[in-house]
Image (tube, rainbow, N blue to C red):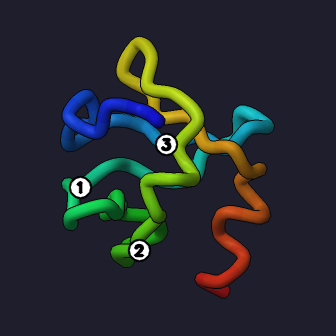
Amino acid sequence: MVDLSQIKGQMEVRGSDGKHVGTVDGMDGQRVRLASGGMYHHIDADMVESVEKGVVRLKLTAEKATQAWH
């Protein structure tokens, strides 16, 4: 599991396909709160694959990660 303390506000969130998902707004316990399209959404921490060079990369594609938002 990823060290959640590495996830900071304003980090970009990308799907496993490299596509933009949103921008980190903060953490709500074990969920990443992010801004996308002028709205706030949450992603469970277990969906995070890695945190590297200011980017949070997910285990799912951007389409799968955002599917429930639409």
In three-dimensional space, the C-alpha distance between marks 1 and 2, rounded to whole angstroms, equals: 9 Å
Residue located 67% across and 87% down the image? 70
> Can you tell which quarter of the image residue 5 is in?
top left
In the displayed structure image, the side of residue 61 where residue 20 appears, left or right: left
Q: Residue at x 20, y 43 (%)?
A: 9
Q: Position of residue 41 (x, y in %)?
A: 41, 74
Earlier along the polypeptide chain: callout 1 or callout 2? 1
At label 3, the amino acid type is Val
Q: Which residue is mark 2?
A: 41
The image position of residue 61, as x and y in percent, is 77, 50
Out of 1 and 8, give the one closest to the viewer: 1
Q: Which mark is residue 13?
A: 3
- Residue appearing at x 46%, y 63% in the figure: 44
Q: CA distance from mark 3 to mark 2?
A: 12 Å
Please state if 11 lies on the left or on the right of 27 as rendered: right
Q: Quadrant of residue 54?
A: top left
Give the mark nearest the N terminus, 3 or 2: 3
Badge 3 vs badge 1, beta-carbon distance below 8 Å: no
Quarter of the image for residue 45 reads bottom left
Say what amino acid the circle numbered 1 marks.
Asp
> In what element is the residue under mark 1?
strand
* Circle 1/circle 2 CB separation < 8 Å: no
Q: Earlier in the sequence, mark 3 or mark 1?
A: 3
Q: Label 1: which residue?
A: 25
